[in-house]
Amino acid sequence: MCIFCKIVKGEIPNQTVLEDEDFLAFNDINPARKVHVLVIPKEHYDSFDVIPPKLMAKMTEFIHKVVSKLNIKEDGYRLITNIGEHGGQEVAHLHFHILAGEYVGRLVG
Ligand code: 5GP
Ligand code: ZN
């Protein structure tokens, strides 16, 4: 089972930002910015390439809710998903990075 599926199952702890029946948003373990949240579907899809469009539409709505909760809309933010080896994807479970605020560590992208 992949590492993010283990997070969904509660086998690996996480700092949850927002959750509903289909999606989970949690803090990245190695943040690049003051705000660095990962958003995942609870069901495993390898990447953006293979998530069904209807579920992606729901995920878009969920991401907007996370952004509202984080209160980052006014100053702006980055929304990134890496796809495959050349996209720099390390965890093969679809996730969107939400990045905002000051740089605190490594660079993303
Ligand atoms: P990718 O390079 O696949 O787009 O990004 C994977 C992200 O997952 C990285 O930013 C990394 O810090 C984060 N990550 C990897 N393992 C864990 C974990 O066990 N918990 C959390 N919260 N984040 C993780
Ligand atoms: Zn998974």
Image (spheres, rainbow, N blue to C red):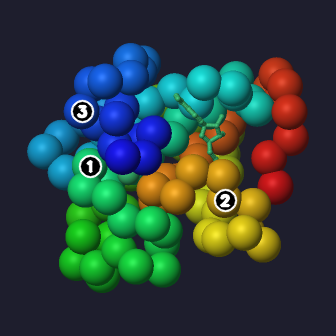
Disc ID at residue 89:
2
Give the CA distance from mark 1 to mark 3. Answer: 9 Å
Q: Horizontal and vertical percent for residue 66?
A: 39, 40
The local secondary structure at tag 3 comes to helix
Name the kind of residue labelled 3 in the image.
Answer: Lys
User: Residue drawn at (86%, 41%), measured in percent from left and top?
Assistant: 107
Disc ID at residue 9:
3
Pointers 2 and 3 in contact (C-beta within 8 Å): no
Dot in front, 1 or 3: 3
The local secondary structure at tag 2 comes to loop
56 or 42, which is in the foreground? 42
Disc ID at residue 42:
1
Task: Name above or below for residue 49 compared with residue 57.
Answer: below
Counting the numbered discs, the total is 3
State which quarter of the image contains the C terminus: bottom right
User: Residue drawn at (46%, 59%), measured in percent from left and top?
Assistant: 94
Give the CA distance from mark 1 to mark 2. Answer: 18 Å
Instruction: Name the side, left or right, on which 9 lies relative to 5.
Output: left
Q: Is mark 2 within 8 Å of ligand 1?
A: yes
- The disc, 1 or 3, on the residue closer to the chain's N-terminal end is 3
Task: Name above or below for residue 73 compared with residue 46.
Answer: above
Name the kind of residue labelled 1 in the image.
Answer: Lys
